[in-house]
Amino acid sequence: MSQFLNDFVVGIDVSSEFSIVAMLAPTGELIRKPFRIDHNPAGFHKLLDILKKKKSG
C-alpha cells in the first residue's frame, strides 16, 4: 500500500491569471469549498498557508 493513501488530495485548475483550488479528503469528501488564488506572491502564500494548516490540523 502507498504511504500516501490517507493524505488529502489537492486539485488545481490553472488559468492565465488565477487558479481554482479544491481539496479532498482520502474518502473523496470535499475538505473545504473550492477557492481562488491569484498568480502573484500573495496568492501563492495564501495557498501555502492553507495547505500547512490542513496538514498540521
Image (spheres, helix red, strand yellow):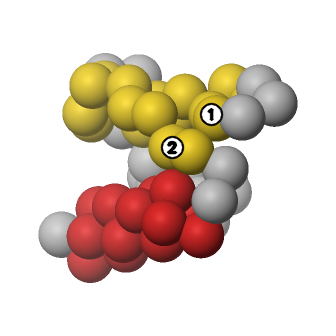
Q: Local crowd at mark 1 within 10 Å, few (<14), some, or many (≥20)?
A: some
Percent position of residue 11, x then y: 61, 33
* Position of residue 41 measured from the top left corner of the image (x, y, whole percent): 59, 69
Q: Against 28, is 51 above or below?
A: below
- How many numbered discs, if any? 2
State the mark number for residue 19: 1
Amino acid carrying label 1: it is Ser
**Residue drawn at x 55%, y 28% as measured from the top left:** 20
Q: Residue at x 48, y 66 (%)?
A: 42
Against 21, residue 28 (above or below) is: above
Near-viewer residue (33 or 8): 33
Q: Residues within 10 Å of mark 2 (few under 14, many from 20)?
A: some
- Identify the residue shown where x is 38% and y is 32%: 35
Residue 37's label in the rendered image is 2
Work out whether residue 15 can be spotted: yes
- Looking at this view, name the residue that lies furthest to the left: 57
Q: Position of residue 48 (x, y in %)?
A: 47, 69
On screen, residue 21 above or below 46: above
Task: Find out whether the residues at labels 1 and 2 contact each other: C-beta distance under 8 Å.
Answer: yes
Q: Is residue 55 visible?
A: no
Vertical relation: 43 (above or below) 49? above
Q: Earlier in the sequence, mark 1 or mark 2?
A: 1
Q: Is residue 18 left or right of residue 9?
A: right
Q: Nearer the viewer, residue 22 or 7?
A: 22
Residue at 62 percent of width and 33 percent of height: 19
User: Which residue is more in the foreground, 21 or 29?
Assistant: 21
Question: Which image quadrant is residue 1 in?
Answer: bottom right
Q: CA distance from mark 1 to mark 2?
A: 5 Å
Regarding mark 2 in the picture, which secondary structure is present there? strand
